[in-house]
Image: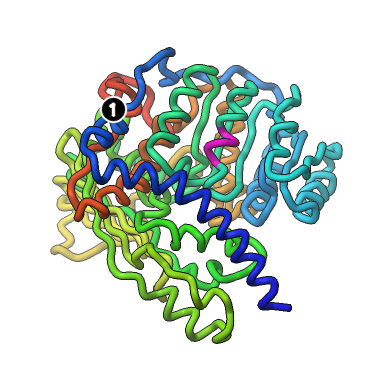
Amino acid sequence: MKNEQTRREMLKNSVLAGFGLTLFGAEVKAASRDENVLAELIAGPAQKNRSMIDVPFERHETVRLGIIGTGLRGRSVLGEFLNVPNVRITALCDIVQEKADRAKAMVTKAGQPEPAVYVKGDRGYEEMLKRDDIDFVFIATPWEWHVPQALAAMNAGKHVGVEVPAGYTIKELWQLVDTSEKTRRHMMMMENCCYDYDELLILNMVRDGIFGEVIHGEAAYNHDLRAILFETKDEGLWRRAHHVLRDSNLYPTHGLGPVANYMNVNRGDKFDFMVAMSSGSLGLQDYRKEHLAADDPRQKEVYKCGDYNTNLIKTAKGRSIMVQHNVTTPRPYDRINLIQGTKGIFRDYPSRIYIEKDKADHRWQTIDAYKEKFEHSLWRVVGEQARKLGGHGGMDYLMCWRLVQCMREGLIPDMDVYDAAAWSAPGPLSEISVQKGSAPVKFPDFTRGKWNTTRKPPIPS
């Protein structure tokens, strides 16, 4: 029975693989072999509509939410929104009835009216999006569905937030930008790590000049996911398939988003070009040999993605960023979260700091002395509640609380579609660079030249 379930899982993944090879492989293959194709891809289509930079939300007394994807992550973020005041969950959508029912029970248990539930196959979300009582759509589905569902939501007149990454091809990322501009709807990536305590503390310190002129940053998603990749109920049903499909940085945004904010990317600087290098692929093979039966069908899978994918990004203003992805080897969790300036350096996991004026004799110091002055206002206002109610140390709650605040008060969102596209672009660009022997690859300018204009900073202090 167990092997039969595994075979069904592999059949689903083979369908994804066929879909993925068409969607992902064609772009990478063409761009890797033909410089003209690559240049056209990076340049993107001509702009037809006004920019969405610094466009505020319209005011909403109550923010009405529809959620597509009610698996582990969808229900987790649903729980965060249910704890935020002035939020109403009006509709839920999934392809699995049991998961949708569990999410519905969470809503009614929280004292809200029973939401509408849509469980009608892969395209059931299209019917949900016809509703006129949804202001914002949250998408927590497998990666390959983020873009089609986000496009459908914007075209239906809804603002939308997607789990990370926002998209998986450069063409898709341009589609998100153009559709946001055309529909005048915000599309953002729900990057929770931008709201973590250390990230917002360091953001304030960078703005105050504590580190001097910023020179370099380092970011990562280094997280042992081997057990998750081989489980057969949730993420293992789809996530491992991407290791079969691609040799790239599959998940760049958790570490890169905060570093991009430190450097004011899209707000005075931009990613200019990058190179990528991928190690060999051994981790998943070693794990399955020890943990799966010899006749398990997954023993025959061929994993394309290297265990370590390392990217080097150069910005237009001469800064450098190192980005890593590794989810297939035994190791502690680490996003690196490093920022180096002319006056000092911060490095996380564990958090430590060295500021030249503190005369610490070239020894790391704790960050504690800086917390009273530089703790971000969001953590001062709702930090206690976030730590009590929120996932991932409170940053999930803070992310949801801040979104609702922006929508209720008619504020400019902290991050926008241009950030979502830029932070996701290392996924396809790293694959192209690896295919080209780690050659440099230009970044698209999704702002179309507006990156160096005066605009609101990300997550104001």
Q: Which residue does the image show at 79% across and 53% down from the upper left?
A: 102
The answer to whether residue 147 is magenta is: yes
Q: Amino acid at mark 1?
A: Ala
Segment colored magenta: 146-150
Res 196 seen here: no
Q: How many C-alpha atoms fall within 10 Å of the one at disc 1: few (<14), some, or many (≥20)?
A: some
Task: Determine which residue is flagged by label 1.
Answer: 43
Expressed as whole percent of the image width and height from the top left, the position of residue 4 reads 69, 74
Task: Report x, y in % for residue 53.
Answer: 41, 21
**Viewed as shown, does residue 384 lie left or right of 455?**
right
Which of the 4 image quarters holds residue 129? Answer: top right
Left or right? Give the position of 88 relative to 222.
Answer: right
Left or right of 299 in this view: 319: left
Residue drawn at (73%, 45%) of the image:
121
Q: Quadrant of the C terminus?
A: top left
The prevailing secondary structure element of the residues shown in magenta is helix
Task: Depth check: give the residue in front, 392 or 324.
Answer: 324
Question: What residue is drawn where x is 37% and y is 48%?
Answer: 427
Colour scheme: rainbow
